[in-house]
Image (tube, rainbow, N blue to C red):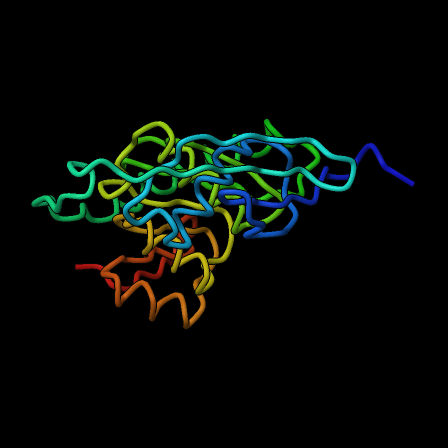
Amino acid sequence: MASRHAVEERRFVLELDGESTFRGTCSPDALHALAAGRLLAEGMLEGRRIAAIDVIERDDAIVLQVRLRAAESHETLSRNLPPHPPPPPQEALHDMLRELFRAGDERHPEGGVHVAALSDGERLLHIHTDVGRHNAVDKVLGGALLSGTDVRQLGLILSARVSGEIARKAAAAGVAWIATRSLPTTLAIEIAAEAGIPIVARAAARDTYVWGAP
């Protein structure tokens, strides 16, 4: 029996150019961002760009239909990129994590969701929530992609533990740093170190841990 206190979760299917590519469950919001972020994090947009995303509601699942096109030549040219900025000071991270938690509580006062966002070191950008922490990260990265935001000068801040999978997604997108209220896994530390991405853990506490800081 459904409860008014339950968190909504739906099955979804991601179809790429007519082929079923991913299946999973998610919170049924920001679905265009979810689709874009999942493709970005899986490295499936190399040399291609998103032409269209259609959301089809079916009884058994939400279908996210994505069509790609070849990127223009000027979009694939390598550029001299500025170095990644370092993580912001601890007090700034404290403030942003408090803001992140408030945003999650306002959107889902019943709780039960993960929250993630990008940050320029002073403010939060592209805040998203989801029942799955990987989905929340996908929505953040996809929202930035669809809006034309360059994440390489931004950090990823999230309420959940940084797993190896989340570190891999961050590395694929090229974010500058990661901050979390929890702790990373050993595999996350390894993947982030290979990508040159610092991780700030327990960023809302006094005993903050930092891996990979310059």
Seen from the viewer's position, the closer of residues 83 and 74 is 74
Direction from residue 187 to residue 112 in the image, left or right: right
Residue at image point 45% right, 68% down? 185
Residue at image point 27% right, 57% down? 197
174 w.r.t. 185: above or below: above
Give the farthest residue toward the left.
80
Seen from the viewer's position, the closer of residues 173 and 157 is 173
Give the farthest residue toward the right.
1
Q: Which quadrant does the C terminus fall into? A: bottom left
Residue at image point 39% right, 51% down? 44
Which quarter of the figure has residue 59? top right
Q: Which quadrant does the N terminus fall into? A: top right
In the image, residue 22 lies at what x, y percent? Answer: 57, 52
In the image, residue 110 lies at what x, y percent? Answer: 71, 35
Which quarter of the figure has residue 155? top left
Seen from the viewer's position, the closer of residues 214 and 204 is 214
In the image, residue 34 lies at what x, y percent? Answer: 51, 39
Residue at image point 29% right, 32% down? 149
In the image, residue 80 lies at what x, y percent? Answer: 7, 45
